[in-house]
Image: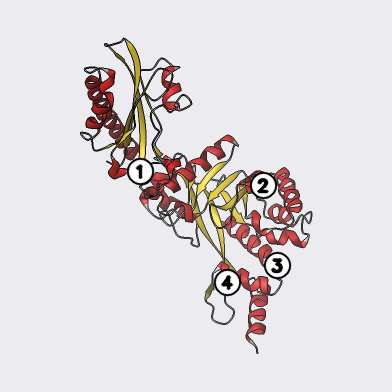
Amino acid sequence: MTLAVKRSSSISKIINDKGIITHFQPIVSVKKKSVIGLEALSRGICPDSGGILPPNTLFSLAEENNLTLDLDRLCRQKAMENFNSLDLKNRDIILFMNFDTSIIDLGIVGSGHLLNQVRQLNLNPNNVVIEIIESRVNDTRALNEFINRHREYGFLFALDDIGSGYSNLDRITITKPDLLKIDRSLISGIDINYHKQEVLKSLVNLAKRIGTLVVAEGVEREDEAITSLELGVDMLQGFYFSRPMAMLGNDLQVFKERINLISDKFKNYMVNKINDAKYRHMRYQTIANHIIHNLSAVNSGAYNALLKDLISQHPNLECIYLLDEQGIQISDTFCNYRNILSHRGSIFRPAPKGADHSLKDYYYLLTNTGMQRFTTAPYISLASGNLCITISTLFKVPENDRRYILCIDLNQNL
């Protein structure tokens, strides 16, 4: 028997014998301190050895033998049967099921098969989330028809693997999902990767604007969980809480301790972060006041020399410069040049004397709101590549009774 024939007969036997087992992985809400749902993950039982076949191997075999539709339906059937057999005290627990969207190209839209499966098992479609990867289907119109039809029945839809491979934001406009599931590739190490944090923050902000919930997948470490929560993720899923496993209804209670633990850790983290921010801003205010005190003691012709001297006294200062009331820069920009990236082109260089800053938030939000001091959100400095904030402070000089704006860029890593 050739290998191809053996592989074909193996997957056929798995399907005919219904040799599929379902493992579940919890999806938790730390804010609600509860398990919100269970994702069903299918494994095959090898007919020859009785060993477990992972889902990638299982579906690759099915695709090779044009049996994807049969396998997908069997996996969903088993998932719903096993979910239905759980002795769940909370009947609002949601079942998350993967749906191989490539079968939509086979013309299955309108068959009613999924709805019939759900009805036969007396499941509520409102408690079933269909996870899809839009990029696997060629017929976008058929996909939209499938989503719209099943949404009318009450099913929820999650767009899976956001942030992985070639995933594009236009997938969101096509599918209009109820949930976004952020891929492990974006969540891994997010606690130490600022760029990943900003990408996730943008996705969370987008989701909130369009009425979509966000699930962070592949959370393996406490710090990944805390950072994801800080950035606004609604639910967490991953090995930090549990590996996929065969489950009994009362098994949900074992996650309670871990959920309560991360809840307390997150609360303490945020309190400490707020206290740290207060201390930092007191320190920054002291620096700004020290600089303004020195500027007020000299005439305007000495500003450049004084700024050059002052920046050397404060190692966490990246750049320092002065604006007039119209937002025009009246001094040179003085930098701690050990922080500046020498390989970057002129477009990234600090602004020169005479530059117009009137459209910068640290100018117009300061001058148009009556505030005396404004602090920007953290950003990556174009000049240094470091994480910085800019603090602008309005002050008056006794020499000519004119008002100026001191701008200081501060390195957040020092």
Number of the label disc, if any, that sits on residue 57? 4
- Disc 4 residue type (three-letter): Thr
Q: Quadrant of residue 177?
A: top right
Indicate the position of residue 150 as horizontal and vertical percent values. Answer: 72, 48
Asked whether the beta carbons under mark 3 and mark 1 sit within 8 Å of each other, the answer is no
Give the Cα separation between the discs numbered 1 and 2.
37 Å
Asked whether the beta carbons under mark 1 and mark 4 sit within 8 Å of each other, the answer is no
Q: In the displayed orientation, state which residue is furthest to the front.
A: 301
Q: Quadrant of the C terminus?
A: top left
Q: Which residue is mark 3?
A: 70
Residue located 35% across and 43% down the image: 386
Q: Is residue 402 above or below residue 30?
A: above
Q: Secondary structure at mark 1?
A: loop
Residue located 58% across and 45% down the image: 179
Question: Which is closer to the viewer, label 4 or label 2?
Answer: 2
Question: Which is closer to the viewer, label 3 or label 1?
Answer: 1
